[in-house]
Each structure stands twice: as structure tokens, then as C-alpha cells.
Amino acid sequence: MRRIFLATTLVTLMAPAHAAGQSHLLVVSGLGGEAGYTEWFTEWGATLVDAALERYGMPAANVTFLAEDTALDPERIDGRSTKAEIEAAFRALVARSRPGETVMVVLMGHGAVGGAGPRVNLPGPDLTAAEWAALLDRLDGRRVAFVNTASSSGAFLEAVAAPERVVVTATKSGMERNEAVFGRHFAAAFAGDGADTDKDGRVSLLEAFVYARAETARAYEDDNKLLTEHAVLDDDGDGKGAEAFTPDGEGRLASILFLGDPAAARAGANASPELRAALERKRVLEGQLAELRARRESMDPDAYQAALEDLLVGIAEVDEEIRRLGGGG
């Protein structure tokens, strides 16, 4: 009885953050300025898109990839990364996503400051940080992550930060102007196994950030170059990027935000409705477990252990159901 009561209580407390099962991804590869950069940014974007679709089982309808040159990868790229097409992509995001669902927006490219404000270079007119913030505000109620991997991206922090929003920038300020490689390693974090530090088969946004930041520093060291980009993360809405994280402070939201579900991807498109429902229940429980662990330091130890036991039993039960339905568990 205690376990059932605790499960009901946890679902009641955490359901607003985890009740909806869909994830949505918008990748924007901006103006390269040179053919080599255009190819780089498109390649990094394609890596992230492939990971979302193939590794994490996101529906193709929920993934949009806009790039400077659609001819570079016509099978993956959905349109040009112009201001008009980005605005259209946001209208589509607002229409198809629901409160509680996860929306991740990732920018690859060159950034700049000055004039009308911080911006990422696009084919044609640029979108300023203030304009990006206005677009993000239209996703009210969603769990939003905005990842700007461009140079000078740190200048975006104050403009786009908001409560219940994760903001990642490749640089800590607008003054770090050299071309940034953080985007390459951020995409690789989702495509490979190296970022999955807790070995739960998926990569949280916080894990991806920590991995990409470390790999970026390693790349500069290997090339005997001075590190000119220092990625930061803000998810408490204060607009001040952090490099260190605490269970109840900076990094809490990023630690429980994921793209799709690798178990659903393994099940394949032909999975039965019963199996898909079981996989969704497991995803919800795992999300609750991640949030519980993030809140451990602020909880009474006995209450934490009781809640942890309840969730672990629930996950074990749904794993058994998934195995019975042929999903492997």
C-alpha cells in the first residue's frame, strides 16, 4: 500500500513536467561565409538530426533541419535557414507541440555582436537575440532548450534566459569571437556513447553539455592552441551562464531533459500499441527518477529512499511487461 500511495504522490507532483511523451527538435545551420564552414555546420547539424531519428526514435515529423545550402544534403535538410523559414518553423513547432513536451532548438554557425544586438549569421537578414527570445516565448509551457553553438554566443544569455528554460552557449561572452567547435562535440554527444556517464542508455542535455565542453578543450589542447571558447549553461533563468552545477541549482533542469527515447527506437515502427504504451510508461518513470535524484539534497533522507524504492520497483515492473511484449526491456 505504501508503494502505491507513493507512486500516486510522485506522479501527481511530477506529471506536469513529464506527462507528455513527445520531443521536438529544430536544428538551424547558419551562414558559413566560406565553403568549408558551410560544410562543417551542415555536417554537425546532420549528425544531431540522425541521432534524434535513429538513436532516439523521434518521429520524422518532429525533427526539422534548416541549413544554408539545401543541395549539400537534400535528404536531410528541410529548407533554407533564412529568417522567414525559421519563423515558419517556429509556427509549426507551436502548432504541433503541447505544454509539457520537450522542444530543443540548436544553432550551428558564426555569431556576432554590435549593431542591432547579438545575432547568428543567416542567409539574408539575421535574427537578433531579442528576436530569438520572442520566438522562444511562443513555446510557453513546453520544456525548452536553446543551444547556440556559434561564436560570440555568450552575448545571447541575458536576452533568451527564462524560467524553466535551458540555455547553452558555446562561449561565455560576446567577446569570444573566434570560430567555435563546440557544436561538433555537442552533436557527437548524442550520436555516441561517451556522454552517457550514468550508463542509462540515453544522454541528458547536461551530460551532452559536460561532454562537449570537455571535448572542445581537448581539441584545442591537441592542436596546441589557446582555448578561445568557454561554454556555459543557464537553466535557472538568471541569464548568467555557469560551469559548475548543483542538484537544486544550475543544471537541475538540464539533467532531466532528453531527446526522444532509445528504447522506442529499438522497438521499431512495427511495435504493438501495448508495447509502445509500456515504453511510454517507462519513459515517464525514468524521467521521474531523474528528477527525484536531482532533488535528493533538498529531501528528507527517508522520504527520498522511499520514493526511490517506489520508482525502481515501478521501472522493474514495466521492464518485465516490455520483455513480455517482445521489446527486450
Image (cartoon, helix red, strand yellow):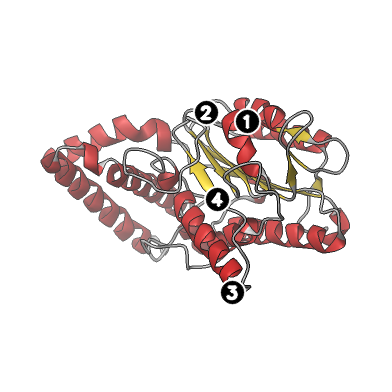
Q: Nearer the viewer, mark 3 or mark 2?
A: 3
- List x then y, in percent, for residue 155: 63, 37
Query: How far is mark 4 from mark 3, CA to CA?
Result: 18 Å
Q: Are marks 1 and 3 in contact (CB under 8 Å)?
A: no
Q: Are marks 4 and 3 in contact (CB under 8 Å)?
A: no
* Left or right relative to 293: residue 112: right
Point out the tag, 1 or 2, that comes first from the N-terminus. Answer: 1
Point out the tag, 4 or 3, that comes first from the N-terminus. Answer: 3
Q: Residue at x 42, y 40 (%)?
A: 253
Look at mark 4 in the image and give the residue it sits on: 231
Point out the tag, 2 or 4, that comes first from the N-terminus. Answer: 2
Q: Amino acid at mark 1?
A: Leu
Look at mark 3 in the image and give the residue it sits on: 222
Q: Nearer the viewer, mark 1 or mark 3?
A: 3
Q: Residue at x 21, y 47 (%)?
A: 308
Q: Which labelled disc corresponds to residue 242?
A: none
What is the secondary structure assignment of the residue under circle 2?
loop
Q: Nearer the viewer, residue 109 or 69?
A: 109
Point out the tag, 1 or 4, that comes first from the N-terminus. Answer: 1
Q: Categorize mark 4 by other alpha carbons within 10 Å: few (<14), some (14-19), many (20+).
A: many
Q: Nearer the viewer, mark 2 or mark 4?
A: 4
Query: How far is mark 1 from mark 2, CA to CA?
Result: 10 Å
Q: Residue at x 70, y 59 (%)?
A: 46
Q: Which quadrant is home to the N terminus? A: top left
Q: Are marks 1 and 4 in contact (CB under 8 Å)?
A: no
Q: Amino acid at mark 3?
A: Asp
Q: Amino acid at mark 2?
A: Ala
Q: Are marks 1 and 2 in contact (CB under 8 Å)?
A: yes
Q: Which quadrant is home to the C terminus? A: bottom left
Point out the tag, 3 or 2, that comes first from the N-terminus. Answer: 2
Q: Which labelled disc corresponds to residue 162?
A: 2
Look at mark 1 in the image and give the residue it sits on: 136
